[in-house]
Image (cartoon, rainbow, N blue to C red):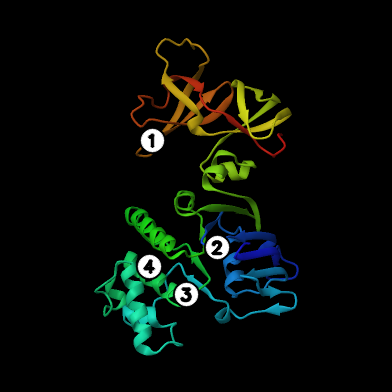
């Protein structure tokens, strides 16, 4: 049984306006980290606020551990939901010390017991010795861990994270993300994370829910959603892709790049395919003659990305993105040979 369920939930901020969340259904399992991923304005933060109790849905039901939090006839206030939340700016109390911040929500405990629990939470996050510091004396990563410790100290059934790593620099973001995930998993915490960062979502979450226009477009493990996107939007948003029209015949499709092997639904008739940039290979074309299954291409642009480089190439009337080794000796204007080495994914979209 899911721990948290949203069933057919809709929220409109005005009766005549577009729905911020539109008939959304989603389930989170106990101990799972679920990431809501999507562009700005897709409804992911609104979904978090509906779970937290900061917004009341116009219709639908929100249920936590068998208890109805919101429905047409019921609404549980946020402070009674057993839901913890960490905001994008951490929202630490500047006049309270670190340990006082963490103990703030433990008012039902005796003071000494609350302080001991706060100290234990700080220890989990590697913040021993920081108890007496004030928030302004902490780094961004330390402030974030204090905010997490404060949210987890009361033992919430679900922890909500709203862009929790966005204010950290890239090097600190990666290391902090790994450490935070380790702590959350050690506690068996159930987490719903909101982010627009695809790499962050894939690295941090057990499952992804890719959102668009207030609805969930696809849910699955990071590996499954990346490898088998259902729609062009999901394929583009999660890692980038090349869209190719083709004519399918079971496990293959005829395209401008030749006959491609396909995965996903059996290809039949006119289809739209997703071909990831790493599913193609480029080599310099030194003699202008295509060999084997390779096609002639012209490099239009190159973008260095550290462990890889992305090349924009023109081939058979198509403009394609190809991901290759950063030391591949190709620059704009060079001729190249292009070969498809992976499989294309059949999308649900209807080709133009």
Q: Secondary structure at mark 1?
A: loop
Q: Depth-wise, is mark 4 or mark 2 nearer the camera?
A: 2
Q: Depth-wise, is mark 1 or mark 2 nearer the camera?
A: 2
Q: Residue at x 51, y 29 (%)?
A: 279
Closest to the observer, 232 or 288: 232
Q: Secondary structure at mark 3?
A: loop
- For residue 271, side relative to residue 92 (left or right): right
Closest to the observer, 249 or 169: 249
Q: Provide the residue designation for mark 1.
A: 308
The dot on residue 144 is 4
Quarter containing the N terminus: bottom right
Mark 1 or 2, nearer chain start: 2
Determine crowd level at label 3: few under 14, some 14-19, many 20+ residues with C-alpha closer than 10 A: some
Image coords of residue 281 (percent x, y): 46, 25
Determine crowd level at label 2: few under 14, some 14-19, many 20+ residues with C-alpha closer than 10 A: some
Mark 3 or 4, nearer chain start: 4
Task: Give residue 227's quadrant in the image.
Answer: top right
- For residue 266, side relative to residue 162 (left or right): right
Q: Provide the residue designation for mark 2.
A: 30
Q: Secondary structure at mark 4?
A: helix
Between marks 3 and 4, how big is the CA–CA gap?
18 Å
- For residue 157, side relative to residue 151 (left or right): right
The answer to whether mark 1 and mark 3 are in CB contact below 8 A is: no
Closest to the observer, 333 or 87: 87
Compared to residue 327, the image places residue 92 above or below, namely below
Q: Residue at x 51, y 16 (%)?
A: 294
């Amino acid at each position: 049984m899911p721990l948290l369920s949203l069933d057919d939930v809709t929220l409109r901020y005005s009766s005549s306006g577009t729905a911020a969340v539109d008939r959304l259904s989603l389930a989170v399992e106990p101990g799972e980290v679920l990431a809501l991923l999507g562009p700005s304005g897709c409804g992911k933060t609104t979904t978090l606020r509906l779970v937290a109790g900061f917004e009341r849905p116009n219709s639908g039901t929100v249920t936590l551990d068998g208890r109805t939090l919101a429905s047409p006839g019921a609404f549980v206030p946020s402070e009674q939901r057993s839901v913890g939340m960490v905001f994008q700016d951490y929202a630490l109390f500047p006049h309270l010390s670190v340990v006082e911040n963490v103990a703030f929500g433990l008012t039902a405990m005796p003071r000494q017991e609350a302080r001991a629990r706060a100290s234990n939470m700080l220890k989990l996050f590697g913040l021993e010795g920081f108890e007496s510091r004030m928030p302004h004396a902490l780094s961004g990563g330390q402030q974030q861990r204090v905010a997490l410790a404060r949210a987890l100290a009361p033992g919430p059934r679900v922890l909500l994270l709203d862009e929790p790593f966005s204010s950290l620099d890239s090097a600190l973001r990666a290391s902090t993300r790994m450490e935070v995930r380790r702590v959350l998993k050690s506690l068996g915490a159930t987490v719903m994370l909101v982010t627009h960062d695809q790499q962050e979502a894939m690295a941090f979450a057990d499952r992804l829910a890719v959102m668009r226009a207030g609805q969930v477009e696809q849910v699955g493990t990071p590996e499954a959603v990346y490898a088998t996107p259902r729609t062009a939007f999901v394929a583009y948003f999660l890692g980038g892709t090349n869209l190719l029209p083709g004519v399918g015949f079971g496990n293959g499709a005829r395209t401008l790049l030749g006959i491609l092997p396909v995965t996903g639904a059996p290809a039949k008739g006119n289809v739209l395919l997703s071909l990831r940039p790493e599913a193609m290979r480029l080599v310099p074309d030194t003699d202008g003659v295509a060999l084997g299954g390779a096609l002639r291409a012209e490099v239009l642009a190159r973008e260095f990305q550290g462990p890889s480089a992305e090349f924009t190439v023109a081939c058979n009337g198509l403009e394609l993105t190809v991901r290759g080794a950063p030391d591949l000796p190709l620059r704009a204007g060079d001729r190249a040979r292009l070969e498809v080495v992976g499989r294309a994914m059949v999308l649900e979209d209807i080709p133009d």
